[in-house]
Image (cartoon, rainbow, N blue to C red):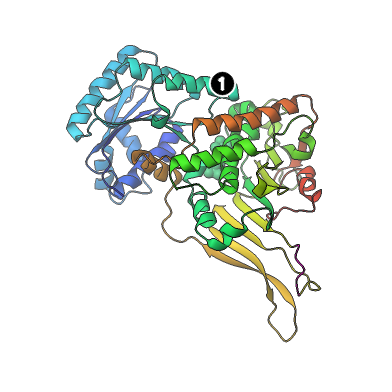
């Protein structure tokens, strides 16, 4: 892997929360590990009128817990420049171009440019157009655009957004971020599936009873009530993170491990998912919203949160069942659930194996084999199997073999930024994946309109409404993490 990436990163939204909490620390880690050293510069832009000095103080503050020394932090911060910017004003792009040229020269960046839009997606089109007309696209180096969800609020808007951006950047130059794809154990899925002959052989409906994807959070909507009222859990988590995980779990083995081959297989998964509509919605989806609980008097109901309507019908929880038309997955459901104010913060995938062969010890209570991929907060893998209980008698007990990742695990953004610098697109989302995902989400939302799938309420700090359990019980299954 080549070190010392030469680049000028231009961050729109440089004064924002994401930049402070995620991007600057991620850049610092890359810097500490020599992926960025002398030849990089960052221009932060936003409306506020900050000076370079003030901006650099903010940068140093954002890495206070990571810095190896004060000198290293201030040397790192010295690569940062600030421009106060109105995204609609062509004059501002002229200033940006002047500064970009100077920094190119000063840091020998070879004209490489990375444009990170950490702003509302409504502004993506305008910025892309202005970058083009303001000649900010380099002729000598690369131009890469990094953007993050929400990519519209439905298929139509998302297509429109793409059309606008594609006037300036090619699909190859667009890096759509889903931070879940930067997580260590999500990155590990292809290796687990295709690097182990045993698992590769049994990764299909003959051996797997069901797959469960849980993205649970114990926090509420915090100060994002206004945003959440517009998005809800379906658009906030399922359209992107959950469908990405589903794609990685169900995809056929790619011909090779590069972005094109992987992306092709992921798109096929999305196309092969049985679509959920008004006729089948009640068998497939449960939507919920958190309410107060006597056990947690300090926690409020969603409807009492700031900027949330008191009769809001927005879902803070969704559970569902996907089926695939792919012959490998015949009748094997993939269940998912995600929600706010659930019992704990836990992201986990459970692969439940079938127990339908006659077994020698069937008269003892044998458990199903379960392989679990622990994505966070702890990273690792565990496998539940039956063992003989130690002692003179012949008895069985379920044991859990557990492997915990102990090494230095890169942060999501650290990995994704490095991947973008290296033009490795395997962990970014293609336009077609976004549109195929929206088709499923739009269909579910359309079916919700006629209220065939009403909101079910669940007390805070529980794992969702009763119906989310019944969804599995109907098929003789049960949630592994509870
Ligand atoms: C974001 C959602 O995409 O993912 C948030 O907008 C959610 O609502 C977050 O809290 C969860 O991410 P993580 O990495 O903490 O599991």
Foreground residue, 256 or 82? Answer: 256
* Magenta-span inclusion, residue 375: no
Is 92 on the left or on the right of 393, as rendered?
A: left
Residue 479 image offset from top left, x and y in percent: 72, 53
* Magenta-span inclusion, residue 358: yes
Is 251 on the left or on the right of 111, as rendered?
A: right
Q: In which quarter of the image is residue 217?
A: top right
Q: Is residue 479 above or below residue 383?
A: above
Residue 332 image offset from top left, x and y in percent: 71, 49
Where are the magenta residues, as a range? 356-360
Principal SS element in the magenta part?
A: loop
Give the residue drawn at x 69%, y 28%. Answer: 443
Q: Is mark 1 within 8 Å of ligand 1?
A: no
Q: Is residue 238 visible?
A: no
Foreground residue, 409 or 28? Answer: 409
Circle 1 — which element?
Answer: helix
Q: Taking the image as four quarters, which one is ligand 1 found in?
A: top right
Q: Name the residue under label 1.
A: 157
């Amino acid at each position: 892997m080549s070190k010392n990436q030469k680049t000028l990163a231009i961050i729109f939204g440089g004064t924002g929360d994401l930049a402070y909490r995620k991007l600057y620390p991620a850049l610092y880690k890359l810097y500490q590990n020599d992926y960025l050293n002398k030849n990089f510069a960052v221009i932060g832009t936003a409306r506020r009128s900050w000076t370079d000095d003030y901006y650099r103080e903010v940068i140093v503050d954002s890495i206070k817990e990571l810095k190896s020394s004060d000198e290293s932090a201030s040397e790192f911060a010295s690569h940062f420049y600030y421009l106060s910017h109105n995204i609609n004003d062509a004059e501002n792009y002229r200033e940006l171009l002047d500064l970009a040229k100077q920094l190119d020269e000063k840091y020998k960046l070879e004209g490489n440019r990375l444009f990170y839009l950490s702003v509302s997606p409504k502004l993506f089109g305008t910025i892309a157009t202005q970058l083009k007309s303001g000649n900010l696209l380099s002729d000598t180096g690369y131009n890469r655009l990094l953007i993050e969800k929400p990519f519209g609020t439905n298929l139509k808007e998302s297509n429109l957004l793409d059309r606008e951006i594609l006037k300036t950047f090619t699909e190859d130059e667009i890096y759509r971020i889903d931070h879940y794809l930067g997580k260590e154990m999500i990155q590990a899925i292809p290796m687990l599936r295709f690097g182990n002959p045993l698992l590769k052989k049994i990764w299909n409906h003959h051996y797997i009873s069901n797959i469960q994807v849980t993205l649970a959070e114990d926090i509420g909507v915090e100060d994002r009530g206004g945003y959440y009222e517009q998005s809800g859990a379906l658009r906030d988590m399922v359209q992107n993170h959950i469908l990405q995980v589903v794609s990685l779990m169900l995809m056929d083995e790619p011909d090779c491990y590069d972005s094109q081959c992987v992306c092709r297989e992921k798109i096929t998964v999305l196309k092969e998912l049985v679509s959920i509509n008004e006729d089948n919605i009640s068998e497939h989806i449960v939507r919920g919203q958190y309410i107060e609980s006597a056990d947690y008097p300090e926690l409020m109901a969603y409807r009492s949160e700031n900027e949330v309507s008191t009769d809001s019908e927005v879902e803070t929880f969704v559970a569902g069942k996907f089926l695939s038309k792919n012959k490998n997955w015949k009748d094997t459901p993939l269940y998912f659930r995600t929600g706010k104010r659930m019992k704990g913060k836990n992201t986990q995938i459970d692969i439940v194996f079938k127990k339908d062969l006659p077994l020698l010890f069937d008269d003892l209570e044998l458990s199903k084999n379960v392989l679990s991929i622990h994505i966070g907060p702890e990273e690792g893998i565990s496998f539940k199997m039956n063992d003989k209980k130690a002692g003179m008698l012949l008895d069985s007990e379920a044991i859990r073999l557990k492997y915990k990742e102990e090494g230095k695990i890169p942060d999501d953004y650290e990995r994704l930024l490095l991947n973008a610098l290296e033009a490795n697109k395997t962990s970014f989302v293609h336009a077609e994946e976004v549109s195929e995902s929206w088709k499923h989400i739009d269909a579910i939302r359309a079916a919700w309109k006629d209220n065939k799938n009403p909101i079910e309420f669940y007390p805070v700090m529980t794992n969702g409404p009763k119906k989310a359990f019944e969804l599995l019980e109907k098929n003789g299954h049960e949630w592994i993490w509870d």
